[in-house]
Image (spheres, rainbow, N blue to C red):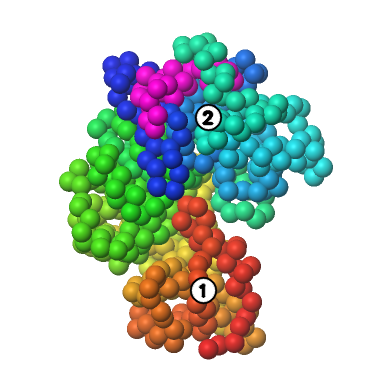
């Protein structure tokens, strides 16, 4: 993403729009255009921020951490980093100060960008990071520069204090022209979850000018048809891999990103029509909530919305079929690691002939299914691995997922290795059971875990959140599962709850689930 490439011929083209969910007002935008950013504004504002960092001592090869909720400044901060040769590192803004301090110790940032809402948490995290009694590398050489983007919002009377710089007050002090020696930056992501020490996954710094950057995920981009005419709706948190990556891809192509400040199913459907959205990115949980909108048959579908795609977790066949019935055959799916080991892709047409598959590998990669160091034939479950074709020195990269290939080379995932349940010596994968439970009309969300069992080692336990206005019993759900999956997979215990813990990305928060519901209880 290099804004001058588009800003030169198309300065007034809209690069980014913040679509409010209805819960909060949009943050003021750069320049005079509140709620949206043109490519000319994106170029100028990212230059100003790059100059500010350069003066503050941030140099190529340093890390810049972004701790912000979805707001209008995201593309500016990202573009500034990608033209300054730094590691652009977005992190989960829902973390507590101690959790965030662990990530800061991993990232060793030269600068942190945050917002008014999160400043207190970030300051507390920086304090903990600087103390660093348990830090493996000792105390950092210098404190990171702290920049707060949005002090004009939501409360203009918020005191700025003296520990960070309010960007609104200094942004016009810096030139709107490029810094000397622009270099392409790199994306950094952390492994998910909030327990243990997260792992940092950094793409390499290439040492090239940002205008010379190669197209990201060119095969996937071509399959999805992302180009200068794309208007992409992103309803998920920007720190997550898919929204962050597709922001870069869409802006590099000269398209428009429509970002929601938070996911809301009704607001998302409104945004598709209001902004002429052509493409949209989802996780399966969001699709479930879209399908459960009241009076959804009365929602007018936009004829411009021609491509939707899902990732982050396998999309169950019945869910894809329901979306196809509603939107038509426009739902694509891809699967891959945030670390960039490889990706698979499946089209709407192939999803109908290979239900449940996440597709075939894209690009210069090959898939392998491995167990105990041996490659397995089609139909047998093992660890999913990617191989980079043509690189004889590269080892297979394990994904942490269990799955199998069919005779046509399509990949099917059956679960995460770390959450597999072993009951009576038999391997059981929660995802298959969760998919079966989610087919019940009275189920809004379902999670499956293993709980201690004196006879079998572990028993299958389901935790179910009923759909609004519905009631359901454990016996009903057990009977429902027996008609869809093998008897040994059917939950022996079903617990009905008001809500399930999920990450902001929509994925189930399995560590919290196990902590909260992992104790054995009496079978109903």
State left or right for residue 95 relative to residue 434.
Answer: right
Where is residue 136 drawn, in percent x and y? 77, 41
- Pick the residue in front: 293 or 154: 154
State left or right for residue 364 relative to residue 179.
Answer: left
- Pick the residue in front: 369 or 524: 524
Magenta segment:
30-53
Classify 136 as above or below 356.
Answer: above
Classify 368 as above or below 41.
Answer: below
Asked whether residue 500 appears in the rendered view, the answer is: yes
* Residue at 32% across, 28% down: 14
Asked whether residue 410 appears in the rendered view, the answer is: no
Q: Mark 2 near mark 1, Cβ–Cβ under 8 Å?
A: no
Location of the N terminus by quadrant is top left
* Residue at 40% across, 47% down: 22
- Pick the residue in front: 213 or 119: 119
**Label 1: element kind:** loop
Magenta segment main secondary structure? helix
Which image quarter: residue 19?
A: top left
Which image quarter: residue 431?
A: bottom left
Classify 477 as above or below 187.
Answer: below
- Pick the residue in front: 114 or 511: 114
Find disc 2 in the rendering and name its residue.
152
Where is residue 449 drawn, in percent x and y? 54, 72
**Label 2: element kind:** loop
State left or right for residue 444 relative to residue 197.
Answer: left
Where is residue 199 drawn, in percent x and y? 62, 46
Find disc 1 in the rendering and name its residue.
497
User: Earlier along the polypeptide chain: callout 2 or callout 1?
Assistant: 2
Residue positioned most to the left: 303
Which label sits in the foreground, 2 or 1? 2
How packed is label 1: few (under 14 Cα within 10 Å), some, or many (20 or more)? Answer: few
Where is residue 323 drawn, in percent x and y? 26, 59
């Amino acid at each position: 993403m290099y804004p001058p490439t588009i800003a030169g011929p198309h300065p007034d083209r809209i690069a980014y729009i913040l679509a409010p969910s209805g819960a909060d007002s949009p943050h003021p935008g750069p320049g005079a255009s509140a709620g949206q950013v043109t490519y000319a504004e994106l170029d100028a504002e990212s230059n100003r921020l790059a100059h500010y960092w350069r003066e503050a001592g941030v140099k190529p090869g340093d890390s810049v951490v972004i701790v912000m909720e979805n707001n209008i400044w995201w593309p500016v901060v990202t573009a500034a980093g990608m033209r300054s040769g730094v590691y652009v590192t977005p992190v989960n803004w829902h973390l507590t100060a101690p959790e965030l301090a662990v990530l800061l110790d991993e990232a060793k940032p030269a600068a942190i960008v945050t917002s008014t809402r999160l400043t207190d948490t970030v300051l507390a995290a920086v304090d903990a990071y600087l103390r660093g009694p348990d830090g493996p590398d000792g105390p950092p050489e210098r404190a990171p520069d702290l920049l707060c983007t949005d002090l004009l919002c939501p409360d203009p009377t918020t005191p700025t204090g003296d520990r960070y710089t309010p960007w609104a007050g200094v942004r016009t002090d810096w030139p709107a022209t490029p810094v000397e020696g622009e270099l392409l930056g790199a994306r950094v992501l952390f492994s998910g979850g909030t327990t243990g020490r997260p792992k940092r996954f950094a793409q390499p710094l290439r040492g090239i000018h940002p205008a010379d950057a190669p197209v990201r995920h060119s095969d996937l981009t071509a399959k999805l048809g992302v180009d200068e005419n794309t208007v992409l709706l992103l309803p998920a948190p920007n720190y997550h891999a898919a929204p962050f990556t597709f922001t870069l891809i869409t802006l590099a192509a000269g398209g428009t990103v429509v970002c929601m400040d938070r996911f809301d199913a009704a607001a998302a459907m409104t945004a598709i029509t209001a902004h002429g959205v052509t493409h949209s990115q989802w996780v399966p949980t969001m699709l479930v909530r879209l399908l459960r909108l009241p009076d959804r048959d009365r929602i007018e579908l936009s004829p411009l919305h021609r491509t939707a795609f899902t990732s982050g977790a396998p999309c169950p066949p019945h869910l894809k079929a329901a979306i196809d019935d509603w939107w038509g055959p426009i739902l694509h799916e891809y699967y891959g690691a945030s670390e960039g080991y490889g990706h698979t892709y499946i089209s709407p047409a192939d999803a109908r002939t290979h239900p449940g598959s996440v597709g075939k590998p894209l690009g210069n990669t090959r898939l392998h299914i491995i167990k105990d160091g041996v490659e397995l034939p089609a139909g047998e479950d093992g660890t999913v691995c990617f191989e980079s074709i043509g690189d004889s020195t590269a080892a297979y990269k394990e994904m942490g997922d269990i799955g199998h290939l069919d005779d046509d080379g399509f990949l099917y995932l059956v679960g995460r290795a770390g959450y597999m349940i072993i009951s009576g010596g038999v391997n059981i994968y929660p995802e298959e059971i969760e998919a079966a439970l989610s087919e019940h009309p009275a189920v809004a969300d379902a999670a499956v875990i293993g709980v201690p069992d004196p006879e079998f080692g572990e028993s299958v336990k389901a935790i179910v959140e009923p759909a609004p206005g519905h009631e359901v019993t454990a016996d009903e759900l057990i009977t429902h599962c027996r008609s869809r999956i093998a008897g040994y997979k059917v939950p022996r215990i079903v617990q009905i709850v008001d809500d399930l813990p999920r990450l902001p990305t929509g994925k189930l928060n399995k560590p919290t689930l196990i902590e909260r519901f992992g104790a054995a209880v009496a079978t109903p």
